[in-house]
Image (cartoon, helix red, strand yellow):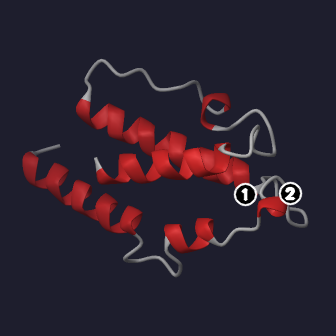
């Protein structure tokens, strides 16, 4: 992949992650998400909101580290990309995951 392609891919990823092409922006969704529903699966969906949030954070972190550290080793797939629990393990875990996601987004 040449420099132009890498730059184009980075720009595309930034636009996708910043919410510019999304129907809803990340911060709006997570800020208003009811705490009592964070560990609940909706209907037949396979994952809770907590699992999806953590999956997004871990996947984004992995992409970032892969991009800036040639010695980075990605987590095992798929187990390393999903939390072990359906619900946040502590009351502060949700906010911490959101903060880390946004920190990596700004990196």
Q: Residues within 10 Å of mark 2 (few under 14, many from 20)?
A: some
The residue beneath circle 2 is 40
Question: Residue lying furthest front in this view?
Answer: 92
The residue beneath circle 1 is 49
Percent across and percent down for residue 15 are: 32, 68
39 horizontally vs 56: left or right? right
Q: Residues within 10 Å of mark 1 (few under 14, many from 20)?
A: many
- In primary-sequence order, the first of circles 2 and 1 is 2
Q: Residue at x 46, y 26 (%)?
A: 74
Q: Is residue 35 above or below residue 58?
A: below
Q: Which mark is residue 73?
A: none
Gap in Å between the C-alphas at discs 2 and 1? 7 Å
Task: Find residue 82 and report its image quarter.
Answer: top right
Percent across and percent down for residue 32 are: 65, 72
Residue placed most toward the observer, 12 or 105: 105
Percent across and percent down for residue 81 are: 60, 36
97 horizontally vs 87: left or right? left
The local secondary structure at tag 2 comes to loop
């Amino acid at each position: 992949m040449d420099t132009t392609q890498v730059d184009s891919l980075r720009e595309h990823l930034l636009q996708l992650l910043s919410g510019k092409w999304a129907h809803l922006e990340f911060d709006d969704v997570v800020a208003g998400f009811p705490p009592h529903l964070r560990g609940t699966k909706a209907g037949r969906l396979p994952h809770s909101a907590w699992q999806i949030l953590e999956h997004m954070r871990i996947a984004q972190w992995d992409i970032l580290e892969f991009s800036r550290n040639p010695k980075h080793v990605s987590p095992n797939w798929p187990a390393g990309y999903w939390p072990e629990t359906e619900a946040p393990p502590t009351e502060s875990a949700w906010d911490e995951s959101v903060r880390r996601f946004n920190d990596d987004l700004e990196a």
